């Protein structure tokens, strides 16, 4: 497709200041962007959040399953996307644990296991000390095979995961001993940064058994456009980027307060630089168009 | 024959087998088996990659081409990481099998490999990733100019979403009551409307098109019509 | 349309700016380094609170990471030796990282573990479960081994053409798998999701619901029309395709806007690292 | 020569027949058994019942869809072989390929081709490599220097084969230099750092990004823009399309990207398969219209037969 909007032969002479702005050295933009993020971090700016329907749907999906029912949390991201996704994971684990859901952790990304471990250490153990490994939660860890892992789990969990991450056989762990396939779960949540992730969970887990469980997903801003087609039918709820995390954090904390609010408040803290940087981008777009109009009115270019 | 017909036959056969296997109960796990093979194959193929990396950089160094010092840095960091990783040098012994050296954990930051990952690999990759924030800004400034209907729609939508993404949207239009007729003009409802209805429709059509494209491309390959992957030496 | 990026002069700034930039960077840089050095000596809060965590190697690590982070950022100004060093280190380290990863997570358990399980169990993976079908495992592991040898054979002086065979197999399997999965989960599922009532009744006639449903279906149909290759975009088809392009533009604008947040988060995270972990000023 | 062509086309036909049979036979059986299973078992038990038989009867509808879509494509190819004139609209991005390479040649600068960051197990990479073949042929004819950095070892091997084949086809095997096609690193951002670094240093005049791209799309496109290169992108990664559309001169969107290699080949068979794709789209449009019509009528009488039919169709499609 031809992309008309990249044409930028803005003005040849460029005598006016505004018109010259059209060809502004992009390093000034870089500097402005850097400052707009650095300053709010240093000043710790924070703004209120208002839950969107998608975040509320995610919250409601978790609320709608019976208390104490087993849920599967798949950590399909790595540290590179942790800034966006870890706040969701923390809030989700706190939410599930507050409702006494049995939690099974797993990862489709090699480094996802570390993120799950981290969440267990920082959220589950300190704030839900009643959770016993093997009985109330199980960490299955990472297995290679991408969507193949999901496909096999859909028919036979022990075949894919003969043992949990620490090497204990599944049949020795009360929580998972009787589980045959994914239909044992009431909810599957994939916090995902790309492939394999929430999309694969929808395709290969929800596809073959659409009514067995609910699927919710957390996604980076980039990936959301790929997941949108699946919401709200194949995926009941979706958390989108830090904003989704911040909104969900508020919903969860509103109903299930936590002793140390900052543990599930990372999303909201990270929204500070967002506002300033977004306003900068809006300003840049306006500026670019003013410069174009100014350049055009001086008879510079088309 | 060996160089053209057999590869085409292999391609055709393996493609057809995978299609049929999807419908045969006992072959359901074949795709996973093949997946494991390909993981192994790509690990074996590192020999090619590493060989090429060495050849290119050694050539740069030996012929003292401009920037040869950087080639040397690449090689040194490559070999350091490779050796500490493959030999698990300084790995933390496995508590269950402390005597088996190669059972040790080499990925903790207490081992050289893990340290390199945490303090060299990870900061470099995530900062490269972070550069995108700058480029998103410069791309928006440069490309979002209202030149025609199409570009107005592109930049207008981006504009609305950007405002709605932050508390600024609520600040500007939050006073419109949720239950009034004008509630659709609230930035948050506009965002939901655009993403849930228009973007979803657009993405759906793109996805359907891609599915057809993938099917046709796969079929062209399986039928042996597209043979551009074959060399002719 | 002609390509239009003729203004490459953006690359070379006016000299008066150069001096400004350099002095700005040097000044702020030296202040920050001074601050970090003092923090590392134990005056930072984190260091005093947890001496075990602030071991020598951690300090060296944080400094290394900080310098590399700044090195990558310096590329925004222009290409420079520090960036080139970062780039070279990153290529070397990351290539080796994935090779080591492939070796220990694929080759050892899935190839060597199947070919010579005893040896692997003794020297590398003591907890590897004993297979119930060692013969089958061995045979199955031979396939990728042979394919691998064929692939690498291209380095040999003769018979390099054989490396096309495994590539042909990879392409064939990929084509077969993707053909099925794309028709199932992309083609059919998306068609199914598009089929919905065009008139929405919610107790009474729901105007906005109906509009939304209509927009959804019209959007899919017009964009699909845009993708038609057999017909020129003229007349009625052209007009429909044009509407399709509008839908595409809104889709892209929306996706672009939604992405910005993630990108800013990533950058914010790097700044948080520099400010908190390195400089202890936040 | 003629015999070779005839032989090749015969072998192609043979493959086509085998493939069609191999697909059709299990489908028919699956279909027959599927109907029986649906009648016998409640919907939730279908999957369980299906796994007991040799064929996955629950996948019957999918089998039919595959036969229809593949049939459309094969039909398009047959149509092309029948010798009828093939009318296919032009794609501006593909018309620009020659122009971009020509410009690079005139300026004495190189051409950069990035085949995405995924392995050959992604069909986009395969499509990218076939496009590389065409681009390399043009570059060989113009005698322009073509640089192909790759992110995977196997992709490097495949790219070398494709470029070498292109040089043979262009009649200039002696100008092929495998040193221009290099593996850098498997790491996404390591690859980006190296490619953007070399872009800024070597200043290629034309940049092609054809394959599976993720976050790096904008890093490539913005740096390419800053060096004043003509940029032509193609990907089926929906999340990255906005960035390519905004920052590149031309973008092949989704399906266009897959059609591009067929376009550029200029072979009748391949062009015919594009016709087949269009036929598939026509069917899709028809299915959507019928589905929506039934659903709309059904909405007014939720208990009626039409509503039931609409629901059945929707679930069959998996929506």
Image (tube, coloured by chain):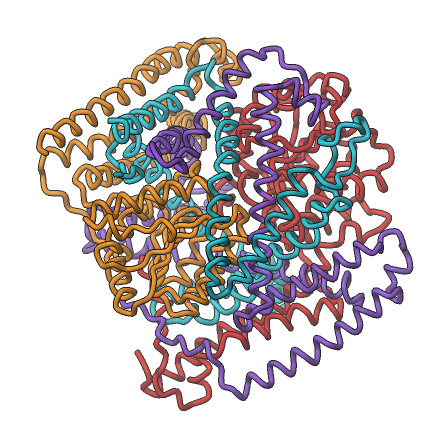
Q: x, y percentage for residue C267?
A: 63, 61
Quarter in which the C terminus of chain D is drawn: top left
Position of residue A37 relative to residue A221, above or below, is below
Residue drawn at the location 62% of the way across and 52% of the way down: B77
- Nearer to the camera, B19 or A273: B19
User: What chain is colored orange?
Assistant: D
Q: x, y percentage for residue B7?
A: 31, 29
The answer to whether any part of residue C195 appears in the image is no
User: What chain is colored cyan?
Assistant: B
The answer to whether any part of residue B146 appears in the image is yes
Residue drawn at the location 62% of the way across and 55% of the way down: B126
Q: x, y percentage for residue B17?
A: 37, 21
**Colour that chain A carries in the picture:** red
Q: x, y percentage for residue A298?
A: 35, 88
Horizontal placement of A155 versus D3: left or right?
right
Q: Quadrant of residue D100?
A: bottom left
Position of residue D105 relative to residue C112, above or below, is below
């Amino acid at each position: 497709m031809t992309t008309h909007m990249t044409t930028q032969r803005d003005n040849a002479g460029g005598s006016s200041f505004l018109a010259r702005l059209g060809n502004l050295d992009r390093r000034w933009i870089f500097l402005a962007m850097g400052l707009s993020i650095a300053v709010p971090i240093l000043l710790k700016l924070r703004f209120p959040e208002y839950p969107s329907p998608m975040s509320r749907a995610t919250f409601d999906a978790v609320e709608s399953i019976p208390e104490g029912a087993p849920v599967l949390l798949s950590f399909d991201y790595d540290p590179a996307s942790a800034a966006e996704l870890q706040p969701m994971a923390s809030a989700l684990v706190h939410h599930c644990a507050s409702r006494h859901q049995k939690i099974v952790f797993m990862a489709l990304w090699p480094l996802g296991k570390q993120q799950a471990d981290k969440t267990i250490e920082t959220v589950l153990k300190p704030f839900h000390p009643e959770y016993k490994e093997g009985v109330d939660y199980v960490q299955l860890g990472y297995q290679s095979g991408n969507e193949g892992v999901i496909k096999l789990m859909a028919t036979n969990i022990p075949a894919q995961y003969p043992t949990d991450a620490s090497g204990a056989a599944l049949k020795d762990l009360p929580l998972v001993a009787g589980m045959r396939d994914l239909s044992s779960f009431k909810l599957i949540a994939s916090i995902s940064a790309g492939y394999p992730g929430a999309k694969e969970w929808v395709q290969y887990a929800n596809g073959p058994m659409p009514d067995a469980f609910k699927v919710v997903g957390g996604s980076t801003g980039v990936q959301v456009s790929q997941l949108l087609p699946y919401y709200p039918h194949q995926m009941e709820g979706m958390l989108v980027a830090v904003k989704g995390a911040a909104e969900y954090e508020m919903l969860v904390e509103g109903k299930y307060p936590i002793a140390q609010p900052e543990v599930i408040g990372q999303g909201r803290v990270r929204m500070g630089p967002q506002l300033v940087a977004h306003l900068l981008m809006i300003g840049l777009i306006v500026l670019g168009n003013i410069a174009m109009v100014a350049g055009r009115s001086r008879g510079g270019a088309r | 024959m060996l160089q053209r017909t057999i590869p085409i036959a292999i391609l055709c056969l393996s493609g057809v087998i995978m299609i049929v296997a999807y419908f045969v109960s006992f072959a359901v796990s074949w795709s996973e088996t093949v997946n494991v093979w390909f993981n192994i194959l790509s690990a074996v193929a590192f020999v090619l990659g590493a060989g090429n990396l060495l050849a290119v950089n050694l050539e740069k160094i030996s012929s003292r081409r401009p920037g040869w010092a950087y080639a040397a840095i690449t090689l040194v960091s490559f070999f350091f990481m490779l050796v500490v990783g493959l030999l698990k040098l300084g790995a933390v012994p496995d508590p269950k099998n402390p005597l088996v050296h190669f059972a040790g954990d080499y990925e903790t930051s207490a081992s050289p490999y893990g340290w390199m990952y945490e303090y060299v690999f990870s900061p470099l990759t995530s900062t490269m990733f972070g550069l995108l924030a700058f480029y998103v800004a410069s791309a928006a400034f440069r490309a979002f100019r209202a030149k025609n209907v199409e570009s107005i729609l592109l930049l207008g939508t981006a504009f609305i979403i950007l405002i709605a993404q932050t508390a600024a949207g609520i600040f500007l239009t939050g006073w419109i009551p949720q239950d009034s007729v004008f509630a659709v003009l609230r930035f948050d409802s506009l965002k939901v409307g655009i993403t849930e209805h228009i973007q979803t429709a657009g993405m759906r059509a793109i996805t359907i098109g891609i599915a057809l494209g993938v099917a046709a491309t796969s079929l062209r390959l399986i039928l042996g019509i597209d043979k551009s992957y074959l060399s002719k030496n | 349309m002609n390509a239009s990026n003729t203004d490459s002069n953006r690359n070379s700034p006016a000299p008066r700016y150069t001096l400004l930039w350099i002095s700005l960077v040097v000044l702020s840089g030296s202040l920050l380094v001074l601050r970090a050095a003092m923090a590392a000596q134990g005056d930072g809060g984190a260091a005093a609170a947890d001496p075990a965590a602030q071991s020598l190697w951690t300090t060296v690590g944080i400094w290394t990471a900080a310098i590399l982070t700044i090195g990558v950022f310096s590329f925004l100004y222009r290409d420079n030796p520090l960036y080139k060093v970062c780039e070279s280190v990153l290529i070397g380290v990351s290539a080796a990282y994935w090779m080591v990863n492939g070796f220990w997570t694929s080759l050892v358990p899935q190839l060597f573990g199947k070919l010579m399980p005893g040896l692997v169990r003794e020297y590398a993976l003591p907890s590897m479960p004993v297979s119930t079908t060692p013969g089958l495992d061995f045979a199955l592991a031979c396939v990728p081994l042979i394919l691998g040898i064929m692939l690498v054979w291209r380095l040999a002086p003769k018979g390099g053409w054989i490396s096309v065979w495994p590539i042909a197999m990879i392409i064939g399997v990929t084509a077969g798998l993707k053909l099925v999965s794309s028709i199932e989960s992309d083609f059919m599922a998306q068609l199914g999701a598009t089929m919905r009532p065009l008139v929405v009744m919610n107790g009474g006639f729901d105007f906005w619901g109906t509009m939304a449903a209509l927009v959804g279906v019209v959007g899919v149909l017009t964009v699909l029309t845009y993708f038609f290759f057999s017909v020129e975009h003229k007349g009625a088809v052209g007009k429909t395709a044009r509407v399709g392009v509008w839908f595409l533009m809104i889709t892209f604008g929306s996706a672009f806007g939604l992405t910005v947040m993630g990108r800013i988060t990533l950058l914010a995270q790097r700044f948080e690292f520099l400010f908190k972990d390195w400089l202890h000023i936040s | 020569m003629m015999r070779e062509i005839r032989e090749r086309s015969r072998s192609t036909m043979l493959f086509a027949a085998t493939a069609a049979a191999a697909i059709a036979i299990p489908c028919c059986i699956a279909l027959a058994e599927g109907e029986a299973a649906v009648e016998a078992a409640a919907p939730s038990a279908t999957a369980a019942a299906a796994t007991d038989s040799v064929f996955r009867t629950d996948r019957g509808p999918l089998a039919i869809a595959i036969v229809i879509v593949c049939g459309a494509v094969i039909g398009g190819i047959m149509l092309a072989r029948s010798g009828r004139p093939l009318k296919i609209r032009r794609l501006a991005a593909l018309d620009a390929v020659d122009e971009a390479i020509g410009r690079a040649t005139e300026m004495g600068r190189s051409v950069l081709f990035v085949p995405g960051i995924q392995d050959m197990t992604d069909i986009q990479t395969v499509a990218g490599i076939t496009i590389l073949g065409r681009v390399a042929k043009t570059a060989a004819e113009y005698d322009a220097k073509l640089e192909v950095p790759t992110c995977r070892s196997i992709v490097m091997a495949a790219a070398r084969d494709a470029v070498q084949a292109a040089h043979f086809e262009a009649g200039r095997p002696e100008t092929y230099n495998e040193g221009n096609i290099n593996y850098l690193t498997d790491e996404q951002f390591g690859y980006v750092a190296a490619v953007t670094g070399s872009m800024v240093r070597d200043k290629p005049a034309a940049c092609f990004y054809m394959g599976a791209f993720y976050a790096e799309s904008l890093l490539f496109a913005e740096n390419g823009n800053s060096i004043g290169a003509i940029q032509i992108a193609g990907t089926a990664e929906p999340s990255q399309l906005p960035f390519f559309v905004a920052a590149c001169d031309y973008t092949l969107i989704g399906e266009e990207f897959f059609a591009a290699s067929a376009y550029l080949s200029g072979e009748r068979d391949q062009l015919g398969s594009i016709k087949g794709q269009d036929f598939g789209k026509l069917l899709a449009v028809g299915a959507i219209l019928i589905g929506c019509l039934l659903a709309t009528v059904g909405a007014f009488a939720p208990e009626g037969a039409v509503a039931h039919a609409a629901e059945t169709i929707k679930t069959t499609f998996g929506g």
